[in-house]
Amino acid sequence: MLIHIKKILPYILIICFAGGSMLLPVDGIAQKADRKNKNKHRQENTALFLEANSNKLLGKLKKAKDLFLECLVLDPEDAASMYELARIERIQNNSDLALEWSEKAVQYGPENVWYLKLLSDLYQENMQFDKSIEVINKMVALYPGNLEYLYDLALTHLLVGNYQKSIQTYNRIEEMIGVTEEISIQKQKIWLRLDNPAEAIREVEALCLAWPGESRYKAILAELYLANDMDEKALETYLAIAEQDPENAYIQISLSDYYRKRGDTEKSFEHLKLGFSNPFLDIDTKIQILLAYFTVKEYYDEQKVEATELANILISTHPDDARAYSIQADLYYQNEEWEPARESLRKVLRLDPSRYIIWEQLLFTESNLSDFEGMRDDSRKTIELFPQQALPYLFAAVASYQFEDHEQMIKDLETGIRFVVRNDLLLAEFYNYLGDAYHQVGEDEKTFEAYDASLKINSENSIVLNNYAYYLSLRGEQMDRAKKMAKKATELDPENSSNQDTYGWVLYMMGEYEEALEWIGLSLENHNEENAEVLEHYGDALYKLGREKEARNYWKRALKAGKGGSDLLEKKADKGILYE
């Protein structure tokens, strides 16, 4: 019997070690099976999570969302999938769902800083700042040395008006990293918001002590002193900056401002000149200061000498910067000093010919100077550089008119008018000059069409009304209309001698000699010098009224006056007879 048992025992041992569970209790068998099941689910969940993330990275958000939800079916406590679902909902602007998933992620992963950070951000986006602060405090408790979380906490306290707590948090950061500009200036602003300038000043004073070589902080401190009526301390600080950093670009401007506020204009201007003489002070700042002289006319009228001096210093300090000459030109233009303005504008264009507005200003200046040769040449250069700008063509046409090049005038006007965009007044001027040009080449029908187009846009243009009426009267056509237009021109511009002469001439052509003589006489009175055309017209009216001797005297005066009379003037003066 023993022999039999010995033979059977090895087989029992083999079965026990091979099967294992055959000799385990029932609950042990169940745990083994559950462990296997969990391992299987974990593997499936990991695979699904990776697939979901791949879809998210590819922008397939719906597919990714479905896969993350499947992950939660396999593992309802999968915080990572909840976190990713929150991020997807945030991308899709579903703020409520994003917040819900984010809160669940933190519930199952309460110490995961990524989950906490997202939840904090979502609370802020939903204006739930108090809850955001609670979450950030947890992050700070978990990672007390993390500066980013402390900065977030300080800023969020600031957003909700917890100013003291914000300052306390900034103090905590300062204990870790020392005094810095960013924190000191932020605390200074908070103290000012709390209406506590003394603490604001102390913050900047501490910053200056920590960084004694940084004059910029002293300048901030001086401004604070000045704003709080601590003038002596402000001046002391400004002078310390000037001594420490004599090439400081802004100190002279600050001192100028200081003395200006105290009413010491002489010292203020002296420091302003020193500031303008400093090549390290950028030209943009200097230009902004100079532009202040243009904003209030009364101030400019009082300070134009100082403005001119500063503009000259600007040029000597920045001789290669076109903007310096541009400012100088503006000053001359403001003073109606056209010749120096023209020279300054030409210097601007030599340094920088790309600025269309300067070319335009130059053409206006040449117009004010009646410099038609310059206008002709510069308008051509402007057209070459800016062929789609309309105004240079008009200036070119005006110059051509002065040189009696009427064909070129018409060419420029017909080209330029195509580039007039959304500017009715400019368009009316083009038609006005086209009418004049067509008349000079004998195309009267085109003349009247152009004048009609101009008056359709601006019926109150006395120059067009005057010329239109005069040219109609020369042809003896539409005399009633000519009379109305000429009369309206005198009403619009009653002191204009040319309008008075035209109205008188239209009346003359209509046989109303007494009234004609009166209006032409007014024109003679208002002319600054003898005008051959008006003198001849006056003589003609006198002759029609039977005053032949007086008429001949006026014809002779017209001859002496020079150009402007008719081809028959010499014959009339010689014979004393009216020829028409």
Image (spheres, helix red, strand yellow):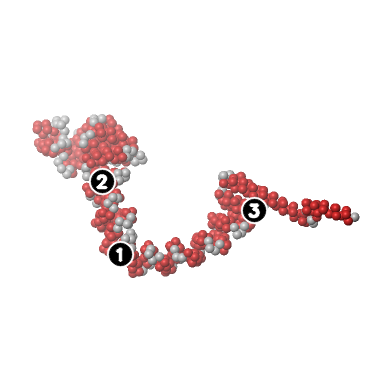
Q: Is residue 124 left or right of residue 479?
A: right
Under mark 3, the amino acid is Asp
Q: Quadrant of residue 505?
A: top left
Q: Residue at x 67, y 49 (%)?
A: 43
The tag earlier along the polypeptide, 2 or 1, is 1
Under mark 1, the amino acid is Tyr
Q: Residue at x 9, y 31 (%)?
A: 575
Q: Quadrant of residue 570?
A: top left
In terms of secondary structure, where does tag 3 sit?
Answer: loop
Q: Is label 2 or label 1 in front?
A: 2
In terms of secondary structure, where does tag 1 sit?
Answer: helix
**Visible residue check, residue 525:** no
In terms of secondary structure, where does tag 2 sit?
Answer: helix
Residue 346's label in the rendered image is 2
| Location of mark 3 (residue) | 78
| Location of mark 1 (residue) | 259
Under mark 2, the amino acid is Arg
Q: Quadrant of residue 503?
A: top left
* Residue 512, horizontal then vertical, whole percent: 20, 35
Viewer-closest of 507 and 178: 178
Q: CA distance from mark 3 to mark 1?
A: 69 Å
On screen, residue 283 above or below 453: below
Viewer-closest of 368 and 512: 368
